Image (cartoon, grey):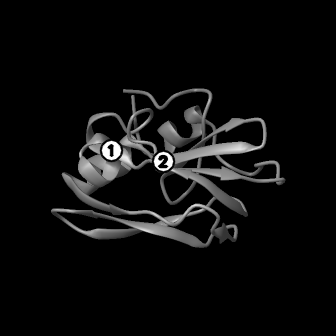
Amino acid sequence: MPSPADYLYTQTHEWMKKEGDILTIGITRFAVDELSDVTFVDLPAIGRKVAAGGTFGEIESVKATSELYAPVEGEIVAVNDALKKDPSLVNQDPYSAGWLVKLKTTVEPHGFMTAAQYDKVHNIA
């Protein structure tokens, strides 16, 4: 299944969707498939400032624990509280219901992969 075309992608498998000065951030289907069943997501407090490339949380699965990285600097303005009760939403719908955080930023995202580039690197058809 191809990655959503209107999102941008990082080398560390986060996706971002820009709406004004807010970026919604999650992890890609490819990352979810590599992790297997997600069992826990540790997300930051609202108001936390993050640096570009800095960690903002962790995601745990039956296979591994992985850090989550902010693609750009900004302030966390929302977290997906539904993941506390049901972390499997990340597995079920990583590009919508399984979003992780919303980040307010003044930085224009650049240098990230398009969906076509991300899919080509990871052989996603």
Which numbered marker is on residue 90? Answer: 1
Q: Quadrant of residue 91?
A: top left
Taking 36 as reference, is 67 above or below it? below
From the image, tell me which residue sits under label 2: 26
Residue 87 in sight in this render:
no
Pick the front one: 52 or 116: 52
How would you rate the neighbour count of disc 2 (Cα within 10 Å): few for under 14, some for 14-19, many for 20 or more?
Answer: many
Q: Percent from the top left, x then y, of residue 75?
A: 69, 61
How would you rate the neighbour count of disc 1 (Cα within 10 Å): few for under 14, some for 14-19, many for 20 or more?
Answer: many
Residue lying furthest left in this view? 62
Taking the spot 77% from the left edge, 49% from the top edge, the residue there is: 110
Pick the front one: 85 or 103: 85
Is 57 displayed left or right of 111 in the figure? left
Residue 2 in sight in this render:
yes
Q: Quadrant of residue 114?
A: top right
Mark 1 and mark 2 in contact? Answer it, CB < 8 Å. yes
Is 101 displayed left or right of 94 in the figure? right
Taking 3 as reference, is 35 above or below it? below
Q: Quadrant of residue 2?
A: top left
Amino acid type at mark 2: Gly
Pick the front one: 9 or 121: 9
Specify the quadrant that holds the C terminus: top left
Taking the spot 69% from the left edge, 37% from the top edge, the residue there is: 18
Q: Percent from the top left, x then y, of residue 70?
A: 60, 62
Badge 1 element:
helix
Amino acid type at mark 1: Val
Q: Percent from the top left, x then y, of residue 31?
A: 36, 51
